[in-house]
Amino acid sequence: MRRREFLKLAATSATGAVLFTGCGSIGNGNPPSEFKIESPVWNPNDLRYGRDAWFATAAPASVGGYGIIVRVFEGRAKKVEGNPDFPINFGRSCAKAQALVQELYHPDRVGAPLRLAGQRGSGQYRAVGWDEALGEVASLIRQAPGSTLLVTEPLNGALGAIVEQFVRATGIQHASLEPDERVVLREAMRRAFGVESFPTLDLANARLLVSFSADFLHTWISPVQFARAYGAFRQGRPAVRGTYYHVGPRLSGTAANADRWLPIRPGAEGLVALSMAQVMLEEGLVEETSAVPFFQALGLTPDQLATDFAPERVAEATGLSAEQIRELARAFAEQRPSIAIAGTSAAASTNGLFNLVAVFALNYLVGSVGSEGGLILNPASPLPDELPANRSGDAYRHWVELAQQIAGGQITTVLVHRANPVYSLPPASGFRDALRGAGSVVSFSSFRDETTMLADLVLPDQTLLEQWGLVVPDPGPGYEVVAVQQPVVNPFVDSRAFGDVLIQLAAQLGQPLPWPNQEEAVRALADALRGLGRGNVTAENPRAYFVTMQAQGGWWDERARAGEARPQAATAPANPEFAGEPGQFPFYLLPFPSDSLGYGEFAHLPWLQGLPEPVSTNVWGTWVEINPRTARDIGVETGDLVRVVTPQGSAELPVYVNPAAMPDVLSVPMGQGHTAFGRYAEGRGVNPLELVAPQVERETGALAWAATRCRLELTGRRMRIARFEGQIPAFQLEEFPIVQVTRPRS
Amino acid sequence: MPRWGMVIDLDRCIGCGACVVACQAENNVPINTEDVYHQRRAIEWIRLERYWEGEYPDIKARYIPVPCMHCQNAPCEPVCPVYATYHTSEGINMQVYNRCIGTRYCSINCQWHVRFFNFWEPKWPDSLKNQLNPNVTVRSRGVMEKCTFCIQRIVKAEHQAKLEGRQLRADEFTTACAQACPTDAIVFGDLDNPESRVARLVSTAVNERGYRLLEDLGTEPSVYYLKKVDLEAPVEEHSSH
């Protein structure tokens, strides 16, 4: 609603403001409280007309939790930039962080606490007051704390401390949800190196990088941190240009940058790694002593490696030739410092943990663990130890159990903050159906996502740019770093920070937490950091200390690094297993996290929906990528609708003929297929998790979403794919190529 | 007087699209909805193109970010009947929105396809309008729009320098795309200031592996590219630079 229209309405109706309440969502207009911006009395005290103000805060954990600064103009957040001081990104940022302002001003934000006003799932809500909503949640918890489950994303820092204290004080259960490959990666880090946090890469000093399916420049754990180092890896040194090989079943947006791409069968990453190790040891390219931790990590003897994993033995199972494996091994051993990493689909196989451990253990062989130009491990959190720093997400297997407990009535109340299990867990988990029948469901989301649509009560959380926080980014830059989040604008709608809500609930339940609100929890932790007496911030008193830390965007201590790494437990080699008979289902189904939408948590932001996926250039939808020859054989072309059938289900998707697709691999992006989550996300595309059979990683119980086979059925129909390619006539001209290439300086 | 230019290193570019979104955020570019893509009318002042090379399994996908080239001899300028498209004294190819009458001659004459016509009135839900940059005009239906090298940032920095009674310092500000770029592939600055990063690149890396897009048309683009380095690239004959 425009201001003029509002004034007209307000003039004709004595109760103008009533128009804005009761509807729950803010619709197209600004919320009524925002009109007070016209009043000098209500202006934020730092507002200066016509001047920019910049505030330092931090990006969400899912994009790496790095430091950002936000331009605020007359009380409105305008633009996100990277924080130039912050040691993870040094001023750099990504598309997802840029789009945070669209989340703040999203037209479909939940504008007030809501109570279900119809059938569960009907989407009919009416607005209620905060006191009433809080009272109801408190009485739900009071009735049966032991049967109450709180679902969050993995949390650390201030909000992690609040949740931990709340869970302890009230005796409720707590589970955290994150993409399953991260669960596998955390376990791999624990076993291979004995650390609890993700690693970083000293690419700026490395000569060779081999990535096994890890989409490290676009979606894998901390893309901006790695991308910044990648720039220096390629062109930051006068005499050396780093070389990057990619080994994996899909030419991802990251893999497209590789000097060489070696397509392998899904799930064969670990096998290739062991075979490389065999070559390096057989040819005496690495020292015997450096092989000790490698063998420990895999529980193998040198003889077993020599007999079972020679390139000629494993070549066929990997899809590479023996010679290719030998060349890769020689390059890895000779072009040191070299780094090997594995992630994304490598972790989402039934042998995901083995794949990761085998690849990361290669770094032991070439002396790259914790050394210059190598794989740098991160130290534990500098925050006091009772906090759940880097608390891992729970594996898929645990979620299935939780779903059964909800369905069986052992869990009667489910509280959900920010995580969206109904969308992120495959239907085979039974979570959606269980939640539909749960006693009570309370959501603390800022949006009506799929999980919130099943809630009886919605207590809207503030968005990232509106609340206080103190978080440990994971992975850090190789030393201890803590980021401070602060509200850059006043809350745009009638929302409350989740931490504040928990603190208020705890008080109502007679179990007060140590802090009066989320901001004070942040300040208390900041003061704990001051107590350490080290780091980048120096100040005379606590207040000055906090202000300095706030202005710099965080706290870090470059000398606080990880100790020596040592394998903690062995992970035995395993072969990938796939759901579906190869005769009936001839293709591998390979979902992949979307470069712009991630796992779907960014699907509500129009800038990211409209940002082309770099390889296919497709936007606003889901598609299935098929090799050109395969497409010709079965008689389909780009835009034809096909039915992708797996043992689990089927979905109709438009074909995108991808010249780089492997002949027997069909790739489908994740992120779409939302049935709720605002106007920009709802009702487009397909969530490939609905096609994925409930295969689990054998040791961690994480969902192996890349372990399903499929077949194609033709529908005879077509569909236009929205995409960037073809918007402008762009061709590589023979005489004047658009992208020119040159050989490296010899 | 500065002469603005840009160097884009294709060996650093990873195709992440941070520049594309940063530009939309800074310059009030309308939302590219699905319908807009179907109509082939997406507006991206800087875009990411992808080119295939070879066949599976020896195949490569290559990225190139393409903003306006800000040609010194720009073919889009002389064809504008109302002088809406003109050249600033600082070397920027500029569009005066309220002069534009939408003949689209400029866009026809641009070989790089970096000029965009507003076929529709740009629309945002009212709440999203809170994000719009107050320093940048929202273009209405019927006018062309294009990359301005973030003219609002240039004007602001120049104004600030004037207030402080000093010369503009090298690299004291940059464009939205260059600021966001995580790999530092995009470098913007004053080509005439030998201390600026862009001028240093032009005198070093550009000599070695620089080229300009469709350079042979003779339009003198202000945007230089550094060639993608490839271990398997064919041995090249020395091209004209």
Image (spheres, coloured by chain):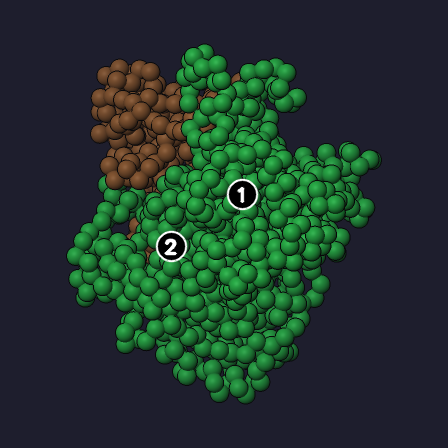
Q: Residues within 10 Å of mark 1 (few under 14, many from 20)?
A: many
Q: Nearer the viewer, residue A132 or A103?
A: A132
Q: Is residue A709 above or below residue B164?
A: below
Find the residue positioned furthest to the top: A11
Secondary structure state at the residue bearing disc 2:
loop
The amino acid type of the residue labelled 2 equals Asn
**Chain A color in figure:** green
Q: Is residue A557 left or right of residue A745?
A: right
Quadrant assignment, res A317: bottom left
Is residue A313 at all visible to an observer of this figure? yes
The image shows a total of numbered marks equal to 2
The amino acid type of the residue labelled 1 equals Leu
Q: Are marks 2 and 1 on the same chain?
A: yes
Q: Is residue A707 above or below residue B191?
A: below
Q: Nearer the viewer, residue A721 or A398?
A: A398
Q: Chain of mark 2?
A: A
Q: Position of residue A655 (x, y in %)?
A: 26, 56
Q: Position of residue A621 (x, y in %)?
A: 33, 48
Is residue A554 at all visible to an observer of this figure? no
Q: Position of residue A177 (x, y in %)?
A: 55, 56
Residue that carries the numbered disc 2 in the rendered image: A687
Q: Residues within 10 Å of mark 2 (few under 14, many from 20)?
A: many
Quadrant for the C terminus of chain A, please: bottom left
Q: Earlier in the sequence, mark 2 or mark 1?
A: 1
Residue that carries the numbered disc 1 in the rendered image: A457
CA separation in Å, label 2 and label 1 = 26 Å
Q: What's the residue at 55%, 39% (across, down)? A: A460
Q: Position of residue A707 (x, y in %)?
A: 41, 69
**Chain B color in figure:** brown
Q: Is residue A704 above or below residue B192?
A: below
